[in-house]
């Protein structure tokens, strides 16, 4: 289990940077998650789960302003031209799908069969996701300038 | 007619990215948000290629592909599958579906364009306004021969041109270079082992971005059976060894439809001047004649009434040169254009030995030719008419 979450953690870090480089032309740096308290801002959480011999979910957390920047760069349009919430949601959902797809394809060199869930989006302020005690949790931080992206990995303990 | 690309993906983002990727090309982008809609659009629009997402709600890419293959009208439509899952199981399953190619997300736009370009012809919108390639433009030539001496001979023979000569010693390497580097013309030895030249030819014809590359066969003059086979296969022509690089330039130039007229036709003080080179041969005659009517018509349309034929580079007038000058003067006559020939006394004397040149207006310099045309219009016209 420990070995698996460490592997997923390393793959998630690789996947986030690769996906954002290819699809958003954004080179994210790896950074410790910011623990400082902030004014509450609207956040987007884009999630894709995986179910099978490895079961869990990866959430990507970004604030709304950064999500708009990401969507505009991904689509090659000005931020003002990003067409409503649906476009931002779809872009974040697609990015999380690619991140988790990459992780799934590379866990134990693709030898761990599992199925991906469809992407889901949650919006709100001061949100956090809690799992039960059997869930392992890891949070990875990434930065583009002052903007932060968090990748939270929740992995179900497969041991009885 | 522009290339029709159908993108079937439940993600609006991916559909927008595909549309953005091909914005600079003369493509029509069709979209569908799920498999059912995708089949309907494909059936109605008959796209040239389909970019199909593997994982979709309603009907996944696997089922869409099965239905496409069962439809007589659509079964030949090439499909590139897009998937976020690069696992061995998924890739194997996709490969077995009979798709032309697959692309793992995330992908760079350039990669998407390259993969699609291997299957269908992509034309840049700006390319429509681009001038035709000229003889003095850079051209990439790939010589495929396992004998380095042949490659070197071609490289040396073309050294005076801005053309770049790359080489490969077997067809697999040659194909990779063609796919990756934008080769303009291929010269391949017909004696490569295991029918390598023909294998390469067929491979190049199998991809949209290489299918129109002219391929010439390299062989010795006596290999007539090989030459016939290559011609039948569809090679652009033969280049026989020992290689005549002047002839080779002409063959490449014609195969690529290179603009060469600027070498012979110039504007001098607003007067069209046709300059014939000393190494005047059949290929030059072809190049000059190919543009003659167009050049003369342009003079008339611009309000001009004369042209100059410059033979100053000629050391001694051969019959082909005389014939070219005569053809030019006759073409001028049909458009009521006056003409004069600039040349040395020796060339003038040589010309005079041919009956056809007896009535031409000769001058030693450009200014003298202009003066002669100013006062000898009727004589020139009369000579041409006679």
Image: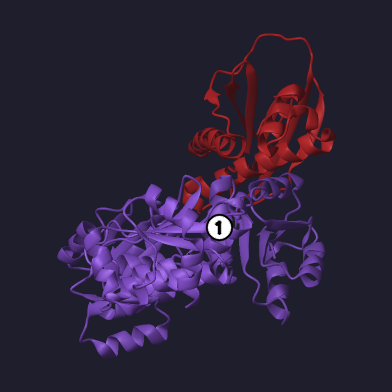
Residue visible at 68% across and 30% down in the picture: A70
Q: Give the residue drawn at x 17%, y 67%.
A: B147
- Residue B23 in sight in this render: yes
Q: Is residue B269 left or right of residue B160?
A: right
Q: Please give the letter of the chain rendered in red.
A: A
Residue B377: where, in percent of width, then height? 50, 61
Question: Can see residue A113?
Answer: no
Q: Position of residue A8 (x, y in %)?
A: 54, 38
Query: How far across and down, in percent of the image, does residue B97 sit?
Result: 60, 71
Is residue B146 shown above or below B301? below
Q: Quadrant of the N terminus of chain B?
A: bottom right
Which percent across, then down, holds residue B292? 49, 66
Residue in the foreground of this view, choosing between B142 and B160: B160
Give the chain letter at badge 1: B
Find residue B372 and report its image quarter.
bottom left
Q: Secondary structure at mark 1?
A: loop
Q: Residue at x 66, y 44 (%)?
A: A97
Q: Report which residue position mark 1 lands on.
A: B305
- Residue that extends furthest to the bottom in the rendered view of this protein: B225
The answer to whether B326 appears left or right of B63 in the picture is: left
Query: In which quarter of the view is residue B94 placed?
Result: bottom right
Q: Which colouring convention does the figure follow?
A: by chain
Q: Quadrant of residue B240?
A: bottom left
- Residue B176 sits above or below residue A31 on the image: below
Residue at the far left: name it. Answer: B149
Residue under the point 66% across and 59% down: B51
Pick the front one: A39 or A109: A39
Q: In this image, B344 relative to A116: left or right?
A: left
B288 lies above or below B271:
below
Q: Looking at this view, is B325 or A93 the one in front?
A: B325
- What colour denotes chain B? purple
Q: Residues within 10 Å of mark 1 (few under 14, many from 20)?
A: some
């Amino acid at each position: 289990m420990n070995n698996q979450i460490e592997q997923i953690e390393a793959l998630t870090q690789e996947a986030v940077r690769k996906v954002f480089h290819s699809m958003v032309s954004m080179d994210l740096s790896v950074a410790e998650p910011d623990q400082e308290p902030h004014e509450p801002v609207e956040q987007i959480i884009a999630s894709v789960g995986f179910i099978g011999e490895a079961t869990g979910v990866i959430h990507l957390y970004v604030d709304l302003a950064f999500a708009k920047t990401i969507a505009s760069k991904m689509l090659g349009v000005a931020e003002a031209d990003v067409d409503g919430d649906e476009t931002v949601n779809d872009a974040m959902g697609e990015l999380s799908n690619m991140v988790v797809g990459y992780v799934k394809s590379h866990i134990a060199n693709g030898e761990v069969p599992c199925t991906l869930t469809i992407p889901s989006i949650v919006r709100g302020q001061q949100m956090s996701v809690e799992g039960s005690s059997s869930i392992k949790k890891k949070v990875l931080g990434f930065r583009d300038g002052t903007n932060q992206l968090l990748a939270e990995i929740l992995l179900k303990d497969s041991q009885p | 007619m522009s290339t029709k690309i159908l993108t079937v993906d439940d993600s609006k983002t991916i559909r927008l990215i595909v549309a953005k990727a091909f914005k600079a090309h003369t493509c029509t982008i069709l979209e569908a948000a799920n498999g059912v809609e995708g089949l309907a659009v494909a059936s109605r629009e008959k796209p040239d290629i389909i970019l199909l997402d593997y994982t979709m709600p309603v009907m996944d890419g696997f089922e869409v592909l099965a239905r496409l293959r069962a439809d007589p009208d659509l079964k030949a439509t090439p499909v590139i599958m897009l998937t976020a899952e690069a696992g061995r199981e998924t890739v194997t399953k996709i490969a077995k579906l009979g798709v032309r190619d697959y692309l793992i997300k995330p992908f760079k736009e350039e990669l998407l364009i390259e993969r699609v370009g291997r299957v269908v012809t992509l034309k840049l919108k700006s390319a429509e306004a681009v001038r035709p390639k000229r003889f003095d433009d850079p051209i990439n030539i790939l010589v495929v021969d396992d004998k380095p001496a042949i490659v070197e001979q071609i490289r040396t023979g073309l050294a005076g041109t801005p053309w770049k000569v790359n080489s490969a010693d077997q067809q697999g390497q040659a194909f990779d270079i063609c796919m990756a580097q934008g080769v303009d013309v291929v010269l391949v030895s017909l004696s490569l082992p295991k029918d390598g030249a023909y294998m390469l030819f067929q491979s190049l014809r199998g991809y949209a971005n290489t299918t129109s590359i002219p391929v010439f066969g390299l062989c010795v003059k006596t290999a007539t059976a090989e030459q016939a086979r290559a011609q039948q296969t569809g090679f652009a022509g033969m280049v026989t060894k020992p290689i005549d690089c002047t002839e080779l330039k002409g063959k490449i130039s014609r195969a690529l439809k290179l603009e060469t007229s600027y070498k012979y036709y110039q504007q001098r003080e607003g007067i069209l001047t046709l300059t014939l080179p000393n190494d005047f041969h059949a290929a030059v005659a072809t190049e000059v004649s190919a543009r003659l009517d167009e050049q003369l018509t342009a003079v008339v349309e611009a309000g001009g009434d004369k042209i100059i034929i410059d033979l100053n580079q000629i050391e001694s007038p051969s019959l082909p040169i005389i014939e070219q000058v005569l053809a030019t003067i006759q073409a001028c006559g049909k458009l009521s254009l006056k003409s004069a020939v600039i040349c040395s006394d020796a060339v003038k004397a040589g010309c005079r030995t041919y009956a056809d040149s007896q009535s031409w207006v000769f001058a030693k310099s450009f200014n003298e030719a202009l003066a002669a045309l100013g006062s000898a219009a009727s004589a020139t016209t009369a000579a041409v008419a006679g």
